[in-house]
Image: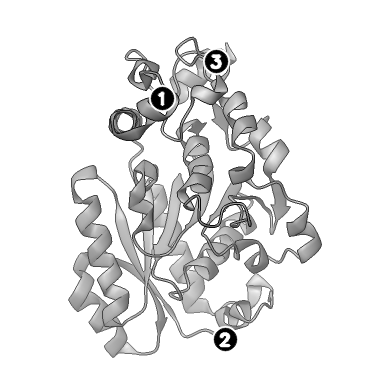
Amino acid sequence: MKIAFAGKGGSGKTTLSALFTRYLAAQGLPVVTIDADINQNLGHALGLGPDELGGMRPLGTNLAEIKELLRGDNPRIASADAMVKTTPPGRGSRLLTVDGDNPVHARFGTPAAGATLMVTGPFSETDLGVSCYHSKVGAAEMYLNHLVDGAGEYVVVDMTAGADSFASGLFTRFDVTFLVAEPTVRGVGVYRQYADHARDHGVCIRVIGNKVQDGSDVEFLREHVGEALDAYVTQSGFVRAMEKGHHPDLTDLEEDNVKTLAGMRDTVDAAPKDWERFTRQSAEFHLRNARAWANDAKGADLTAQLDPDFLMGPSALQKQSG
C-alpha cells in the first residue's frame, strides 16, 4: 500500500512517518520510505547520521537518469527528455516492485531502520529564485506512477507541509493519506483544506491526532473532523525523544501508542486497491499538465504518450516479467 503523511508544519508528520515506518519494518514487512518534504528530516528521524545522509543520491537531482530507467522501450515516449513528472507508464515502460530487483532502489536507496529510504533532496544554490520544490517532488511522483506494490508491501511518503501537495497529481497516488493534526484550530484547518481539494478525486484521508493530552483534546478533534479521525497519539516521552534527535528502542513506546500504530496498519490494510482508478487518474493529470504547460515546454504533443490499452497493476507487471 502507498501511504502519505501530510499536515501543517510542526504537526509531527515527519516523526510519525518515521515511527510508522519503524513499526512496519519491525514486523518484518518490506517498507520503502521517501522524504518528499522541503525540510529533509526523515533520515535523521530514522537514525541516519550526516555521513550516511550525505552519501545518498537525491531523486530530485537525478531526474534524467530516473526517466531513462522508467522509459524502458515504451514506443510512445521518444526520449527520456520527453518525459515529464506526470508521464504515465504504458506497454514497454519499466515497472517497479517494492521487493526484489528495483534499479531505483539500488541507485538511490539506503537502509534505514529496516526500511529502504529515498530522498527527493533539498534546495541547492542553483535552485534559489529559479525553480519550485515540485521540480524535485516530481521524481517521487514518477516513481509512484511506475510502482506495482503488492499485498503486505508498504511505501511511506513524508509529504511537504500544508496543501502544496495539490500542485500536482501526487496527492492521488496513495491508498491512504494520514493527515497529522494537533488538537488546535490551525491543525484541523489543514484537514478541511485537504478534504476540500481532494473531495472529487476519491482520496482516502484519515486524521491522526497528535500531541493529545486528555479527553477534551480527543473531543475537539472529533467535533471538527468527525468520522475522519482514525486514531491519536498521546503525549509521549518516546516521541518527544525522537523530536530531540534521539532514537529509543521501539519496545519502549507506550502501550497505547503501539495500539495506535497497529490500528493505523489495520486502516491501511483494509483500504481497497483500485488499479483502474490509479490508471485513470494518471491519465487525467497527465492530460491536464500536457495542455497547461508541458506541450509548450517540450515542443511536442505529450497527450500522445498515453497508452489507451494499458492498465497499471499486477497483470502489467506479469506481462513485463514474461
Image location (x, y in percent) of residue 301:
35, 18
Q: Amino acid at mark 2?
A: Gly
Q: Left or right: where does residue 165 sit relative to residue 220? A: right
Determine the residue positioned at 45% across, 34% down.
Answer: 145
Q: Nearer the viewer, mark 2 or mark 1?
A: 1
Say which of 221 and 250 sits in front: 221
Residue at the limit of the structure toward the front, as seen here: 129
SS type, badge 1:
loop
Task: Please tell me in which quadrant of the rendered image residue 41 appears.
Answer: bottom right
Image location (x, y in percent) of residue 310:
38, 16
Q: Marks 2 and 1, Cα distance to the nearest angstrom? A: 43 Å
Q: Left or right: where does residue 54 sit relative to residue 131? A: right
Task: Please tell me in which quadrant of the rendered image residue 104 appears.
Answer: top right
Taking 144 as reference, is 70 above or below it? above
Res 320 label: 3
SS type, badge 2:
helix
- Residue beneath disc 2: 237
Q: Crowding at label 2, few (<14), some or many (≥20) Cα neighbours within 10 Å?
A: few
Q: Amino acid at mark 1?
A: Met
Q: Crowding at label 1, few (<14), some or many (≥20) Cα neighbours within 10 Å?
A: many
Determine the residue positioned at 33% across, 20% down.
Answer: 303
Taking 137 as reference, is 42 above or below it? below
Residue at the limit of the structure toward the right, as seen here: 51
Q: Amino acid at mark 3?
A: Gln
- Residue beneath disc 1: 312
